[in-house]
Image (tube, coloured by chain):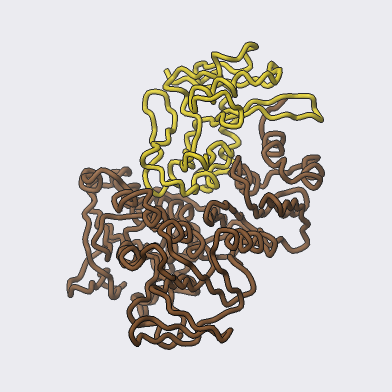
């Protein structure tokens, strides 16, 4: 069963525990700026919205990579950056239409959510279940996929 | 069914892989004129900076990759096409028959017509072979004259500086990277280069190069330089001379339809050599960038395999790293006719963002010093999302583009 991160902004309080957990797991520091999941503050609406890579089927980042440094983890469905192969050219960061793969200047490579090998720290850290790791069929991923279709550069065939 | 692909860059390789995965059962021949395994020119700056070795530039890392997919690789250069007989003439005197042909021959670096520029000590930085020459010629303290201040010139600066070269860049026009950066952004990049000890001379040309006991270059600002090396990075042009007389229609590049097919049935073109549908203008443009080559390659191969696929057009996008200062541009970054824009400039911190709108849709952008979530700019442009009330917020603060993307496209409530 492929699982996916389900994000329900209405439950998010903006505590940033997810960002802390992610940055600690991935970079060894408690520093939201280094987190791969970000909580966006919609102050006009009074809403906090966590967002990260949806591991989309189109895999824009993977197809744009010129040096084969982004691979598919067949077990989790995650698209994973292989640090030793990434040269830091950043083409994936402009190709991903979701803005969820980003350049880390201090490491000289790009970084993105890899689902923590199937045990995502952000979901475990979230105290309000705004982020859960569930069966992919339950995540409302369909809505995200509709968006991906709108962005796709290939017309769906009749 | 014989599929022949001319050119082993990203477009050609992705097309070959896509054909293989379609399982059409025919032969796939991938023809490249360079001796190395297919590699990425995008990675060359990082070879110059010692971040990778040559194998780090290879498009695919497994040496058996092509063989496993049933792709035959052939080192040769195409010299002509007989479209009636369905044959490609090669420079080794052989002929290669095809049923479906893909022209993915890419582009080459150009040399301006300057006296003496064809002599020794002058290199492009386009191929692995060029890079080896450059690496051999530079020692700490070497003076390097870089001709050009565009995309390629900027991305190789880091490697040159890291190796201790004293770099002077000369550019004919009034600013740096004028093909992808606004005047303000180009100005920031120039100032940044100055801070890093790189001399950038705008509106300056070399008039003559002589080789009498070392390189001597006369500039039209009446200066004379004695560089150890001249690197020419003034632009590229599509590699399509070999199709002269074939009847394949060309303009700036090889003209292709929305299936990446040329005017001749069974002959397709992709990547830097192809002039295909432009997402922004609706016309046909050459977008010599990695993402376009990758998308073209896939669409062309699907159609070659008999799986109809229609391209929605390439979006111009670039990301540039000039000695650590990162800049991007997307789509109609120069603005759309009748459109408007929003701009945020922070000269002190080298941060800049300009968004171009058409009504309440984002159609282009240019940024400096922004590395987080920039892909969302592409997403907003390519989905032609109506920003609604987010337009006003972006005009007030363009840096909120990621929130605008989420607010316009995702269920945030």
Q: Nearer the viewer, residue B231 or A51?
A: B231
Visual hue assigned to chain A: yellow
Instruction: Say above or below: B251 vs A96.
Output: below
Which residue sits at x=68%, y=22%? Answer: A9
Q: Position of residue B279 (x, y in %)?
A: 59, 56
User: Residue at the spot x=30%, y=65% of the render?
Assistant: B136
Instruction: Give the colour in which the image draws chain B.
Output: brown
Left or right side of A96 for B128: left
| B355 left or right, relative to A27 | right
Q: Which of the two residues, A49 or B31, is positioned nearer the viewer here?
A: A49
Q: Is residue B101 visible?
A: no
In which quadrant of the rendered image does the C terminus of chain B lie? Answer: top right
Q: Give the vertical position of A59 relative to B291 (above or below).
A: above
Residue B389 position within the rendered picture, expressed as x and y whole percent measured from the top left: 81, 40
In which quarter of the view is residue A98 placed?
Answer: top right
Residue B206, position as x, y percentages in the image: 50, 82
- Of all residues shown, which one is farthest toward the front? B141
Q: Is residue B312 left or right of residue B269?
A: right
The answer to whether residue A151 shows anywhere in this view is yes
Q: Nearer the viewer, residue B364 or B216?
A: B216
Q: Residue at x 48, y 63 (%)?
A: B152
């Amino acid at each position: 069963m492929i699982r996916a991160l389900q994000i329900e902004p209405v439950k998010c309080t903006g505590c940033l525990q997810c960002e802390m957990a992610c940055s600690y797991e991935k970079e060894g520091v408690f520093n939201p700026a280094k987190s791969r999941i970000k909580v966006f503050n919609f102050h006009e609406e009074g809403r906090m919205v966590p967002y990260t890579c949806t591991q989309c089927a189109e895999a824009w980042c993977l197809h744009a990579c010129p040096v084969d440094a982004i691979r598919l983890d067949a077990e989790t469905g995650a698209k994973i950056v292989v640090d030793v192969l990434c040269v830091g050219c950043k083409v994936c960061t402009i190709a991903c239409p979701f803005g969820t793969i980003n350049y880390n200047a201090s490491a000289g490579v790009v970084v993105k959510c890899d689902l923590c090998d199937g045990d995502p720290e952000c979901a475990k850290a979230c105290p309000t279940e705004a982020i859960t790791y569930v069966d992919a069929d339950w995540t409302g991923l369909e809505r995200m996929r509709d968006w991906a279709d709108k962005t796709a550069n290939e017309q769906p065939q009749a | 069914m014989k599929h022949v692909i001319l050119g082993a860059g990203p477009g050609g390789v992705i097309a070959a892989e896509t054909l293989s995965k379609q399982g059409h059962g025919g032969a796939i021949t991938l023809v490249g004129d360079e001796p190395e395994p297919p590699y990425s020119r995008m990675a060359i700056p990082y070879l110059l900076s010692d971040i990778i070795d040559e194998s780090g530039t290879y498009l695919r890392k497994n040496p058996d990759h092509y063989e496993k997919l049933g792709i035959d690789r052939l080192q040769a250069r195409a010299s002509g096409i007989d479209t009636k007989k369905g044959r490609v003439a090669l420079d080794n005197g052989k002929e290669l028959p095809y049923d479906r042909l893909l022209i993915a021959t890419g582009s080459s670096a150009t040399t301006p017509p300057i006296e003496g520029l064809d002599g020794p000590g002058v290199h492009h930085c386009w191929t692995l072979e060029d890079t080896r020459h450059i690496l051999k010629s530079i020692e700490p303290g070497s003076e390097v004259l870089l001709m050009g201040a565009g995309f390629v010139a900027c991305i190789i600066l880091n490697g040159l500086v890291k190796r201790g070269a004293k770099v002077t860049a000369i550019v004919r026009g009034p600013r740096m990277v004028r093909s992808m950066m606004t005047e303000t952004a180009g100005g920031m990049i120039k100032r940044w280069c100055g801070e890093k000890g790189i001399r950038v001379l705008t509106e300056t040309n070399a008039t003559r190069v002589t080789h009498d006991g070392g390189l001597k270059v006369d500039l039209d600002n009446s200066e004379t330089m004695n560089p150890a090396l001249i690197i020419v990075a003034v632009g590229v042009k599509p590699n399509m001379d070999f199709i002269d007389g074939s009847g394949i229609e060309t303009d700036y590049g090889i003209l292709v339809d929305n299936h990446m097919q040329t005017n001749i049935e069974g002959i397709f073109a992709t990547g830097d050599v192809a002039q295909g549908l432009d997402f922004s203008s609706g016309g046909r443009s050459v977008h010599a960038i990695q993402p376009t080559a990758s998308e073209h390659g896939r669409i062309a191969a699907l159609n070659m395999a008999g799986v109809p696929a229609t391209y929605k057009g390439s979006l111009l996008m670039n990301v540039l790293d000039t000695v650590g200062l990162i800049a991007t541009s997307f789509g109609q970054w120069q603005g759309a006719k009748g459109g408007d824009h929003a701009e945020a400039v922070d000269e002190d911190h080298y941060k800049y963002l300009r968004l171009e709108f058409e009504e309440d849709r984002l159609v282009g952008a240019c940024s400096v010093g922004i590395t987080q979530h920039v892909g969302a700019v592409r997403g907003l442009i390519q989905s032609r999302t109506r920003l609604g009330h987010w337009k006003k917020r972006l005009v007030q603060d363009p840096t909120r583009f990621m929130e605008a993307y989420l607010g316009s496209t995702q269920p945030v409530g």
